[in-house]
Image (cartoon, grey):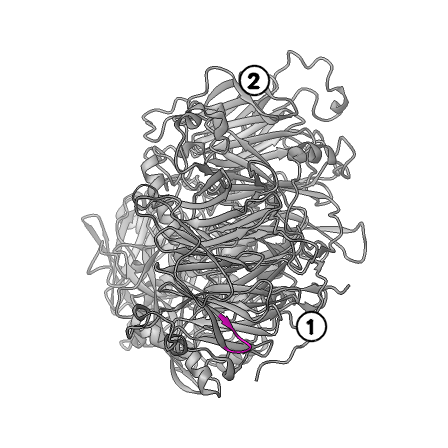
């Protein structure tokens, strides 16, 4: 969470003016800033003032930067109320007709979703289980920057979620050489680089990878000494849950650590990298939109994800077994969505534990994978990593783009 | 008797890793030199890559590698000493010797090259290095080496130190300045390079020196004077003494040879006794080498290579054997490199004649031996050095523990007398017989005895006679006497086709793609490029019977699909005559006739299964009916597989590729590890690379509609639990290129829980049925390389008949079975439905699985203890060993260079941890992952030189 983005209300106005738009209709009303109430009350109020009691709505608001951001739980509702200055502009849509995209600059370039990492599910019209839709159920992560607190500032670890998506990964890699500092001075060493991005592909749309970024690791395994073909095969083998650590060619957009305490979520996450067995082990930063989008506090996310579902993340590429006469069932514990696109699969968008275990020790995973999955998850970081993290643990995480 | 051995350095480096490259089978790639030691009866072959291989009787083999990859141009044995001299293309001389020690002992230095120093301290030696060595002659005394050079000088070196004896050097000027030499030999020009050096057979120290321009000098080396001059007019190619020393023969550039008499008292001899151009009168090519061997019956045997009429047969590779009226022109398919005769040892006083018993001809692609004692000079089958690549190898199959019955019937070919029998094979007779079957491009299957060090051909099976092809299958080139046309024509020269190297395939559709042999029931399944699957049975009698033909449509009425590839082979209409051995019983032809990509045989159930790029089928060869056909093409994949999967599309293309392959094989360097460049060089190389556009690789997950997705990669029969945990029964498993696995439950009469003993009675009318049990789609869609079923103890199920005939421990049917599926990416096992263990090899190492085998490793300490391990050969040429069923990585070995794609593709594993792969088109490298089972030369040679374990190096 980024404090610099917050514009504190210095007018000490006790009410927030609300302008709500649904289709072509506008409604104006006001809310008590100090007592905004809960989200479901607010949602009911909106249905009431627009006279659409049984219509399912998507609620969005324009934040101070002109970004269209969602309101679908108490947290972002409170955030929206507290940052309204003074007018809170709301945009309502029928859920089945939704065509807005939440994210940065989303109001100015509506359907141009180049930088938007949070996409509305395209299959929103499909049948949904009758549960209250909240943020994680409504959105599927597409990419994330992970392990910010344990990586050097010059590196970036990006996770691409290809799962069940039509969009191609859309990038190419090549051989190249990079300059390393060695005791003997500068030395050119062979390396693997991103050579091309396919327009409209997943990699390009995340904005987290760029041409000439050097690939350092693939799913926690260093690529040093591996050939282009080997790295290609590794990436394809991991394509359903690809985690690439790159050294971006453009070092100006790096994650900057510092700023002391940081926002509430930032502090909580700074030290979390060390323990990977507790439920609160999130690195607390997600790259929704790549900008300081109002990231909810980690504690809320945890509530949205049963622990069991988190752990199953490792087994993300389940194979499909068809019994004769019966319907398809997954070979693993949780239902896979291969071949069954109607069954939505919900990814824990901030689950960073598996990749951290992966990157800590590839061998540990090898042995762990044959045992119960919890082994892999409880892998403790190697001592040097722990030391590195300790030096960083007081840092909050702040990002600038 | 002491044991001596040579073994290559390569194997020792790998010993610490316990991956041993034990022995090379087959014919050395690109041989360049040949030598024979008549005393020890050892033969040496040098290659263009700097290797020297020494062979004696079968099983006696030594290998050495020069430090440089330079072609070996000449090899000479120091007779009886176990030493040999090699001359390399870079003008260096190396002395080698067999060193004491057992083959397994790795401490001693196996190779002791004594290089001739390129910059020696003595000026005359400098001169030697400046001029190119053309010929070498080892004097019979054994301590002197004569070196003929391009500049015409003859130098003498002391052995074994290879130090120059300056006082003995004979420069050309000393000959030219003779008064007796006619002017036309002097006239300012030199005599040309020394072409031949031959020592007088009776009087040591007398040398015959032949110069390129024709002059031959008899030189007395002790008194340093010219005894006689022979004024040859033609360019000289080679010289040979007659045994008595009264005659010598010279061969010439114009295709003729001359016999010269050595008579005392006459200093200059102008005319030879006789001179003939055997293949004249039109211009002929040179006779490169001639041998003259006396026999007791009177007429000498003359053997020479070349000399063919230039215009009509200038492109033939020929060797002529002549004695009296008998005259045979051996017509080879590849270039003659060198030849020698095996004949009586010279110091044997009682003998006055050479009495050659055999001639050994080294060709570029094979070794041919002709028996000179048997009238008609038939060729002898070689017990080793067989040209594996006589037709390109297209697949291979290994059977271990062959029952003696089958072995005897196969080995009926009979072992002929082999003339090279030096050394003693110390290796114990193999515990079990091993067979290697190779499928070839010409539709033949060759059976090799792979039990020992010498890979001996046992039997050759041709499948071409099942079909009606353009070439008449009865046209056997090795048997010209049967052909009436040939006899009538009275062809001159009297050619006789010899050797079996014939890389040109008549019909590429005949090429064998998959082989499976059941060693207990003697049933063989052979599948080929045009979708043909042939079931053969072993018979000791010649038989002419019709072959049942069935056609199986694997497309199953798929709409809108047209096959644009080759036609299926036409089965022969009239019954063909099949020689004893494996004789075809049933022919199944797949439609469309795409290349067969997988076969499985279960002789106990009388079932075969076969897969192509379109689907797979199940056939009951006992009842001659197709049980199942299943199309594996993806519905979106309408464009895929309309053409053949085979790399050969047409005969024309096949020929073109054959040429390309030959050319490629000529340039490919091999075996020797490339020196790792320094980082500086690497950086320089990198800097250069940056200028060219880099290669890009697209990163995208595999999708269902990639072409070739339907290719069936593996098939497997198993008696296991498919439907539920209590009733086991026959099952068939198939895996495809796109990660699909199909499992069928089979209803085989008499097989299954509780009914196992009822077989035989009442099976007449019942048919085999197949019901689809499960379909597994692997998420990553990587090709399925292998499927096998493990029993309740995690051991692989035994082969058909093994359990029922008490040849193996019965599988554990009490506990749950699991199936091990190896895909290109991952190796994992599934019991019933859910994934049990998984190892993601590609995700970790970036390598793909190419070959998979379950191998039993025996314990060295405990005789009966063995563990099963999964061995994966990856596309990087390394081997990963995994425990089963836990799939824990055990070890990893680098085995084959990753650039050696054909080597990786050709790799075959045996069940006891050995394996073979092609290191050249003609050679198999044998390796062993198990310390218990090693096949390596273990032999001794009796030497009459004093034993120096570490001889002094030349200083």
Viewer-proximal residue, A243 or B861?
Answer: B861
Q: Is residue A316 visible?
A: no
The relative height of residue A9 versus residue B586 in the rendered view (above or below) is below
- Residue B811 image point, x, y percent: 74, 38
Crowding near the residue tagged with mark 2, few <14, some 14–19, many ≥20 C-alpha atoms within 10 Å: few
Task: Say which residue label 2 marks.
Answer: B544
Disc 1 is placed on an element classified as loop
Q: Quadrant of the N terminus of chain A?
A: bottom left
- Residue B668 image point, x, y percent: 42, 58
Write down the quadrant of residue A11 in the picture.
bottom left
Viewer-proximal residue, B507 or B620?
Answer: B507
**Mark closer to the chain start, 1 or 2:** 1
Write down the quadrant of residue B604 in the picture.
top right
Of tags 1 and 2, the one toward the viewer is: 2
* The magenta stretch spans residue B825: no
Q: Which segment did they paint magenta?
A: B219-224
- Residue A68 image point, x, y percent: 27, 60
Instruction: Specify the subunit that label 2 lies on.
Output: B
Task: Say which residue label 1 marks.
Answer: B107
Q: Quadrant of the C terminus of chain A?
A: bottom left
Q: Which residue is found at the position 53% from the left and 27% from the top?
A: B534
The relative height of residue B382 versus residue A255 in the rendered view (above or below) is above
Q: Quick check: B64 left or right of B88?
A: right
Q: Is residue B188 visible?
A: yes
């Amino acid at each position: 969470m980024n404090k610099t983005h917050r514009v504190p209300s210095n007018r000490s106005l006790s009410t927030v003016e609300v302008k709500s738009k649904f289709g072509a209709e506008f409604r104006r009303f006001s809310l008590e800033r100090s007592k905004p109430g809960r989200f479901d009350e607010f949602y009911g109020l909106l249905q009431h003032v627009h006279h659409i009691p049984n219509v399912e709505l998507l609620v969005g608001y324009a934040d101070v930067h002109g970004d269209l951001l969602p309101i679908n739980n108490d947290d972002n509702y409170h955030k929206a109320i507290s940052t309204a200055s003074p007018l809170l502009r709301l945009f309502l849509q029928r859920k089945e007709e939704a065509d807005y995209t939440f994210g940065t600059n989303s109001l100015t370039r509506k359907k141009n979703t180049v930088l938007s990492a949070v996409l509305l599910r395209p299959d929103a019209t499909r049948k949904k289980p009758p549960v209250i839709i909240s943020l994680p159920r409504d959105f599927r992560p597409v990419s994330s920057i992970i392990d910010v607190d344990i990586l050097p500032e010059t590196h970036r670890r990006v996770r691409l979620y290809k799962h069940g998506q039509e969009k191609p990964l859309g990038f190419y890699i090549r051989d190249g050489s990079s300059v390393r500092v060695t005791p003997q001075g500068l030395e050119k060493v062979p390396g693997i680089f991103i050579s091309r991005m396919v327009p409209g592909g997943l990699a390009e749309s995340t904005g987290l990878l760029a041409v000439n970024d050097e690939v350092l690791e693939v799913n926690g395994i260093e690529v040093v000494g591996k050939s282009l073909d080997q790295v290609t095969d590794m990436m394809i083998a991991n394509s359903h849950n690809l985690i690439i650590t790159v050294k971006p060619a453009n070092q100006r957009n790096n994650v900057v650590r510092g700023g002391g305490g940081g926002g509430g979520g930032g502090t909580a996450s700074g030290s979390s990298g060390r323990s990977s067995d507790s439920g609160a082990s999130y690195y607390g930063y997600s790259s929704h939109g790549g900008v300081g989008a109002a990231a909810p506090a980690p504690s809320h996310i945890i509530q949205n994800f049963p622990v069991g579902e988190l752990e199953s993340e490792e087994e993300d590429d389940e194979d499909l077994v068809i019994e004769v006469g019966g319907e398809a069932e997954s070979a693993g514990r949780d239902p896979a969505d291969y071949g069954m696109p109607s069954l939505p699969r919900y990814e824990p968008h901030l689950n960073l534990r598996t990749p951290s275990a992966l990157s800590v020790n590839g061998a540990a995973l090898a042995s762990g994978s044959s045992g119960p999955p919890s082994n892999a998850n409880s892998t403790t970081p190697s001592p040097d990593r722990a030391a590195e993290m300790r030096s960083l643990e007081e840092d909050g995480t702040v990002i600038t783009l | 008797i002491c044991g001596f051995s040579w073994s290559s350095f390569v194997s020792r480096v790998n010993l610490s890793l316990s991956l041993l490259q034990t022995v090379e089978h087959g014919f050395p790639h690109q041989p360049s030199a040949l030598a024979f030691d008549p005393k020890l009866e050892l033969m040496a072959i040098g290659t263009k890559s700097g290797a020297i291989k020494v062979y004696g009787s079968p099983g006696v083999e030594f290998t050495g590698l020069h430090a440089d990859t330079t072609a070996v141009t000449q090899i000479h044995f120091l007779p009886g000493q176990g030493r040999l001299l090699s001359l390399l293309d870079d003008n260096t001389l190396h002395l080698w010797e067999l060193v004491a020690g057992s083959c397994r002992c790795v401490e001693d230095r196996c190779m002791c090259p004594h290089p001739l120093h390129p910059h020696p301290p003595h000026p005359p030696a400098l001169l030697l290095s400046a001029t190119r060595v053309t010929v070498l002659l080892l004097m019979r005394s054994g301590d002197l080496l004569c070196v003929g050079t391009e500049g015409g000088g003859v130098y003498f070196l002391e052995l074994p130190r290879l130090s120059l004896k300056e006082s003995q050097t004979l420069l050309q000027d000393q000959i030219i300045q003779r008064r007796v030499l006619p002017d036309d030999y002097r006239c300012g020009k030199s005599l040309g390079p020394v072409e031949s050096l031959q020592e007088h057979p009776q009087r040591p120290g007398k040398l015959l020196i032949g110069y390129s321009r024709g002059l031959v000098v008899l030189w007395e080396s002790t008194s340093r004077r010219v005894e006689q001059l022979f004024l040859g007019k033609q360019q000289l190619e080679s010289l040979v003494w007659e045994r008595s020393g009264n005659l010598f023969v010279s061969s010439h550039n114009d295709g003729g040879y001359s016999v010269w008499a050595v008579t005392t008292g006459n200093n200059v001899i102008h005319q030879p006794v006789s001179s003939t151009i055997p293949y004249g009168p039109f211009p002929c090519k040179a006779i490169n080498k001639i041998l003259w061997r006396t026999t007791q019956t009177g007429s000498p045997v003359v053997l020479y290579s070349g000399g063919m009429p230039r215009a009509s047969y200038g492109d033939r590779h020929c060797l002529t054997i002549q004695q009296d009226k008998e005259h045979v022109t051996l017509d080879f398919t590849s270039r003659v490199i060198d030849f020698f005769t095996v004949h009586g040892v010279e110091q044997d006083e009682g003998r006055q004649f050479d009495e050659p018993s055999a001639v050994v001809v080294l060709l570029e692609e094979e070794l041919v031996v002709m028996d000179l004692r048997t009238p008609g000079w038939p060729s002898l089958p070689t017990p080793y050095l067989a040209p594996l690549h006589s037709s390109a190898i297209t697949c291979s199959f290994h059977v271990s523990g062959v029952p003696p019955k089958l072995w005897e019937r196969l080995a009926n070919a009979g072992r002929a007398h082999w003339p090279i029998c030096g050394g003693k094979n110390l290796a114990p007779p193999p515990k079990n017989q091993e067979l290697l079957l190779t499928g070839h491009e010409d539709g033949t299957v060759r059976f090799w005895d792979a039990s020992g060090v010498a890979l001996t051909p046992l039997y050759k099976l041709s499948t071409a006679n099942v079909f009606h092809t353009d070439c008449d299958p009865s046209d056997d080139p090795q048997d010209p006497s049967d052909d009436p046309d040939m006899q009538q024509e009275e062809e001159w020269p009297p050619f006789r086709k010899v050797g079996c190297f014939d890389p040109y395939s008549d019909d590429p559709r005949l090429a064998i793609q998959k082989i499976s042999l059941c060693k207990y029931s003697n049933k063989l399944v052979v599948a080929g490029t045009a979708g043909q699957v042939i079931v053969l049975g072993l018979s000791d009698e010649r038989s002419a019977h019709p072959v049942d033909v069935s056609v199986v449509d694997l497309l199953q009425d798929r709409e809108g699909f047209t096959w644009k590839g080759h036609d299926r082979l036409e089965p022969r209409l009239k019954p063909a005559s099949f020689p004893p051995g494996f004789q075809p019983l049933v022919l199944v032809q797949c439609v469309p006739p795409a290349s067969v990509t997988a076969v499985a045989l279960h002789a106990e159930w009388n079932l075969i299964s076969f897969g192509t790029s379109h689907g797979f089928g199940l056939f009951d060869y006992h009842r001659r009916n197709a049980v199942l056909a299943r199309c594996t093409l993806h519905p979106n994949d309408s464009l895929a597989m309309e053409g053949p999967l085979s790399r050969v599309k047409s005969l024309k293309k096949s020929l073109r590729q054959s040429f390309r392959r030959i050319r490629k094989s000529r340039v490919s360097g091999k075996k020797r590890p490339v020196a790792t460049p320094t980082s500086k060089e690497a950086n320089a190389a990198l800097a250069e690379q940056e200028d060219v556009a880099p290669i890009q690789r697209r990163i995208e997950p595999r999708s269902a509609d990639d072409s070739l997705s339907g290719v069936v990669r593996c098939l497997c029969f198993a008696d296991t639990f498919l439907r539920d945990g209590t009733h086991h029964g026959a099952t068939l498993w198939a895996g495809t290129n796109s990660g699909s696995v199909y499992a069928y439950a089979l209803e085989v009469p008499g097989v299954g829980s509780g009914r196992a003993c009822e077989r035989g009675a009442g099976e007449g009318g019942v048919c085999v049925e197949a019901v689809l049990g499960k379909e597994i789609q692997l998420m990553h869609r990587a090709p399925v390389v292998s499927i096998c079923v493990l029993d309740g103890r995690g051991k692989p199920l035994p082969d058909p008949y093994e359990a029922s005939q008490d040849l193996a421990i019965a599988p554990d049917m009490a506990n749950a079975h699991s199936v091990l599926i190896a895909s290109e990416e991952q190796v994992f096992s599934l019991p019933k439905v859910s994934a049990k263990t998984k190892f993601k090899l590609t995700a970790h190492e970036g390598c793909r699985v190419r070959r998979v085998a379950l191998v039993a490793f025996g314990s060295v300490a405990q005789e009966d203890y063995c563990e099963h391990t999964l061995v994966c050969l990856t596309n990087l040429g390394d081997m990963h060993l995994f425990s089963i069923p836990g799939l824990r990585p055990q070890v990893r070995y680098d085995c084959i260079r990753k650039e050696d794609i054909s080597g990786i593709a050709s790799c075959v594993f045996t069940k006891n941890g050995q394996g073979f792969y092609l290191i050249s088109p003609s050679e198999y490298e044998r390796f062993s992952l198990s310390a218990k089972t090693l096949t390596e030369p273990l032999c001794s040679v009796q030497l009459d030189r004093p034993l120096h374990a570490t001889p002094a190096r030349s200083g």
